[in-house]
Amino acid sequence: MRGGPVGLHCPLAGTPCQPHDSTYASLGGRLASRCRTLLGDASSSRRRPGDLSRRQSHGRLRFSARCELAPPPKIAVRGLSRRAASTGALVLDAVSLDVAAGQLFGLIGPSGSGKSTLLRAINRLWEPERGRIFVDGRDVTGMDVQQLRRRVGMVFQSPHLFPGTVADNVRYGPALQGIALGTEDLQSLLLRAGLDPSAAFLQRSALELSGGEAQRVSIARALANSPEVFLLDEPTSSLDPTATRKVEETMERLRRDEGLTVVVVSHSMPQIERVADVTALLSQGRVVEIGPPGELRDSDNPDVASFFTGELS
């Protein structure tokens, strides 16, 4: 899909849009309003770059154009594929997508669609057989793994806290680098994760916390490494509604107030609609659609409709 202009002219920037091989959306006739949403009013000094889209059929996907003003993505995935070791079946099938800096990006889809596999590849928990992943334009396979994982923090479905106190867990990552966190540092990290910053909480046993508390301690532990990107793999799937909302608020706050790039895997479309700026719908290892979550329900892509009716596998 690379090449010259596709005939879509930006009404705000006054420049033609170029095809982009990994930006998919379903904006249809809503192009003009979408332009204004992403770029701001033409007369506004706060106008910012973004995606402009026109639907073009290409197999099961909907390709869009990308505004030439758009900055390079924070995360770029290109042609990523993986086969299951036991069966040889494709788990990921030539997946390509971009995540913008400071974006809260959702990955949604049926069980077994490849969401978690894709997320783990960004953190190099497995090495790509085909395809490449870039963070700030650098191929992650060329980066030191520990350096990458400090820049790209990850929180899993289960907290996996270590025996010891909350303080022991939160200071663990920096301690490996020879950095000793003081009490004020620890309290600041707890606050960022939406937790009680008291000395009493810091001294609580990590193994005696509630599920929601433990998950947010995991977030604080990851934040201690000062990541630029935060990956969360179904972080609320085992939590009650109150704890779920607290984790969601933490994700939103990290993106909104601190400018972190956040990628979250979820099986819950209502959750993605609450928190994500953009979401990718995966099925059978392929990207079916990418766009603002609130617009997916209006898509005329039959695979998207099948997802909402529970028929997509």
Image (cartoon, rainbow, N blue to C red):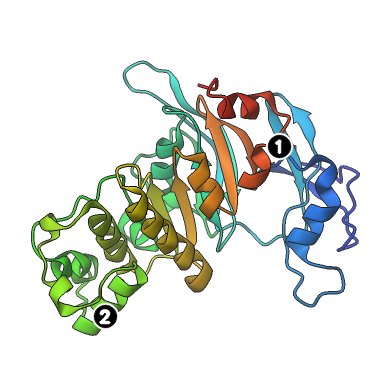
Kindly indicate the quadrant of the structure image that contains residue 286: top right
Q: Secondary structure at mark 2?
A: helix
Residue at 34% across / 67% down in the picture? 193
Q: Nearer the viewer, mark 1 or mark 2?
A: 1
Circle number at residue 213: none
Q: Could you tell whether 76 is left or right of 260 in the image?
A: right
Total labels drawn: 2
Can you see residue 144? no
Q: Could you tell whether 54 is left or right of 26 in the image?
A: right
Cα separation, mark 1 vs mark 2, equals 46 Å
Query: Against 291, is 260 above or below?
Result: below
Q: Which kind of residue does numbered mark 2 sit on? A: Asp
118 or 252, which is in the foreground?
252
Q: Could you tell whether 79 is left or right of 266 in the image?
A: right
In percent of width and height, residue 31 lies at 83, 49
In percent of width and height, residue 237 lies at 34, 42
The residue carrying mark 1 is 298
Can you see residue 310? yes
Q: Which kind of residue does numbered mark 1 sit on? A: Asp
Q: Residues within 10 Å of mark 1 (few under 14, many from 20)?
A: few
For the N terminus, give its image quadrant.
top right
In percent of width and height, residue 67 lies at 77, 55
27 or 237, which is in the foreground?
237
The residue carrying mark 2 is 185
Query: Against 233, is 129 above or below?
Result: above
In percent of width and height, residue 33 lies at 82, 54
Q: Secondary structure at mark 1?
A: loop
Residue at 80% across / 48% down in the picture? 18
Kindly indicate the quadrant of the structure image that contains residue 7: top right
